[in-house]
Image (cartoon, helix red, strand yellow):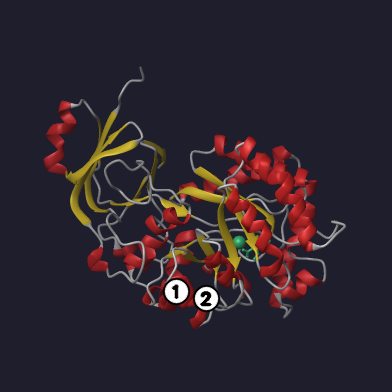
């Protein structure tokens, strides 16, 4: 029998739990549960009790908990969840960045053979080991900045064997970092230039040959597709998504990045999330708000491309669920700083602290279908991050410059 281990952390100046918040709609800061002078009692990997430090202290002694006594002012938050990244890749696209700043658009660069295809070539040329190493390095950087759960997409392989290589790399990287990596199959990123056949035939090959392997090798239970003029049309993708659904795989969509169309498909197929949405109009906002599909804003892509932000305020005011993710990738979003990007989105879109923090914790966990994390509450994983400050509002106020001082993952301190 495994031994039960208790840990007691405190006193914590403010624990912002993010518990008991509605999944959808606008949030006011008053809705945040902020426990002043908190203690957190952890049992193995989970939160066992949270409440006033003085109240829990006697119980911590009774169960012989390891005491982690905090002598400075800390604010505790649930570990951040980044629900959309492409951080498994090889090479650089610094040239694309320079070309964009010289006036070429993302779609023009893609059409002239650069863009995503460039990273596909570099990723195919990389060994499994090199991909694992790069993925672990980026995941750890994220972890030390408070991101304890990271979705990671394939999509730079674009053939059966190369997509499998990427998903194996993500799986191996997951075992080499303390962060949890959640893999998503994005074989429908673009139609590969070297595929002899139509986009529909490519998708048919992938769904027939790769989907069963995803299941049998436990590589992913999430299917993503880029619906865009330069990638796949709603018509191309319909059968692909239907097959994914029939196999019980979750669907997520790169939707409405430059042109609308993707979010409508996402809602029609009951996708768990529709991500990007920079081009969404009132119509798409209403569709999403009236659905169970979570809208995911990717401010890092807007900043990387120099385009408008996702209409986050309108989505929330219409009653939608809004998560915020980094989209960390070598092309459109090379920065990969989730907190900084969320905070900047907040200034442009006028988001409350509660909306921003929910967007990178509980609402982001929901976008991944994970109910065991995203808040500091009894029974949730003890993924907790600590900022050296006495007021939680400082965290977004410093726009990402205030980094966590301590990161706990599944009940263990993994960074301080
Ligand atoms: O989410 N839009 C499509 N895919 C990625 C970009 C990938 C790349 O440029 O390498 C995105 O922005
Ligand atoms: Fe993306």
Q: Which residue is drawn at 74% across and 56% down?
A: 203
Locate the C terminus and report the quarter of the image it occupies. Answer: top left
Evaluate if marks 1 and 2 touch, with contact meaning CB atoms under 8 Å apart: yes
Ligand 1 neighbours mark 2 (CB distance < 8 Å): no
Q: Is residue 170 left or right of residue 337?
A: right
For label 2, the residue is: 309
Name which quarter of the figure residue 333 lies in: bottom right
Residue 247 in percent (x, y) is at: 60, 47
319 or 326: which is nearer to us? 319
Q: Position of residue 59 (x, y in %)?
A: 15, 32
Residue at 55%, 79% (x, y): give it: 308
Q: In the image, what residue occupies the spot 22% across and 57% down?
A: 34
Q: Quadrant of the N terminus?
A: top left
Residue 238: give x, y in percent of width and height.
66, 63
Q: Please, which residue is most extreme toward the top here?
A: 1
Horizontal and vertical percent for residue 36? Answer: 18, 54
Q: Classify 65 as above or below 97.
A: above
Q: Look at mark 1 in the image and give the residue it sits on.
A: 312
């Amino acid at each position: 029998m495994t031994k039960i281990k208790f840990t007691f952390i405190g006193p914590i100046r403010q624990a912002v739990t993010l518990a008991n918040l509605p999944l959808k709609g606008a949030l006011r800061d008053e809705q945040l549960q902020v426990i002043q002078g908190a203690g957190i009692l952890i049992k193995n990997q989970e939160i066992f009790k949270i409440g006033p430090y003085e109240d829990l202290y006697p119980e911590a002694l009774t169960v012989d908990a390891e005491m982690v006594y905090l002598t400075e002012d800390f604010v505790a938050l649930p570990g951040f969840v980044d629900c959309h990244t492409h951080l498994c890749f090889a090479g650089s696209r610094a040239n694309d960045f320079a070309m964009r700043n010289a006036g070429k658009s993302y779609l023009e660069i893609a059409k002239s053979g650069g863009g995503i295809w460039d990273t596909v070539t570099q990723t195919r040329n990389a060994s499994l080991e090199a991909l694992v190493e790069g993925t672990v390095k980026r995941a750890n950087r994220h972890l030390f900045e408070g991101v304890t759960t990271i979705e990671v997409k394939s999509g730079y392989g674009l053939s059966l064997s190369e997509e499998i290589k990427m998903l194996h790399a993500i799986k191996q990287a997951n075992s080499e970092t303390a962060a949890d990596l959640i893999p998503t199959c994005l074989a429908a990123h673009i139609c590969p230039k070297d595929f002899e056949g139509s986009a529909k035939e490519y998708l048919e090959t992938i769904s027939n040959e790769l989907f069963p392997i995803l299941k049998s090798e436990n590589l992913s239970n999430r299917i993503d597709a880029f619906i865009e003029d330069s990638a796949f049309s709603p018509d191309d993708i319909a059968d692909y998504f239907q097959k994914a659904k029939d196999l019980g795989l979750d669907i997520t969509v790169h939707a409405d990045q430059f042109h609308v169309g993707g979010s409508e498909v996402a809602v029609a197929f009951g996708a768990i999330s529709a991500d990007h949405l920079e081009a969404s109009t009132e119509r798409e906002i209403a569709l999403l708000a009236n659905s169970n599909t979570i809208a995911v804003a990717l401010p890092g892509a807007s900043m990387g491309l120099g385009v408008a932000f996702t209409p986050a305020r309108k989505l929330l005011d219409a009653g939608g669920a809004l998560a915020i993710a980094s989209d960390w990738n070598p092309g459109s979003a090379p920065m990969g700083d989730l907190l900084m990007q969320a905070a900047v989105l907040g200034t442009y879109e006028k988001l409350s602290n509660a909306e921003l923090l929910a967007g990178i914790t509980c609402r982001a966990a929901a976008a991944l279908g994970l109910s065991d994390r995203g808040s500091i509450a009894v029974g949730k994983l003890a993924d907790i991050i600590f900022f050296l400050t006495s007021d939680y509002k400082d965290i977004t106020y410093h726009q990402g410059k205030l980094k966590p001082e301590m990161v706990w993952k599944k009940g263990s301190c993994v960074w301080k």
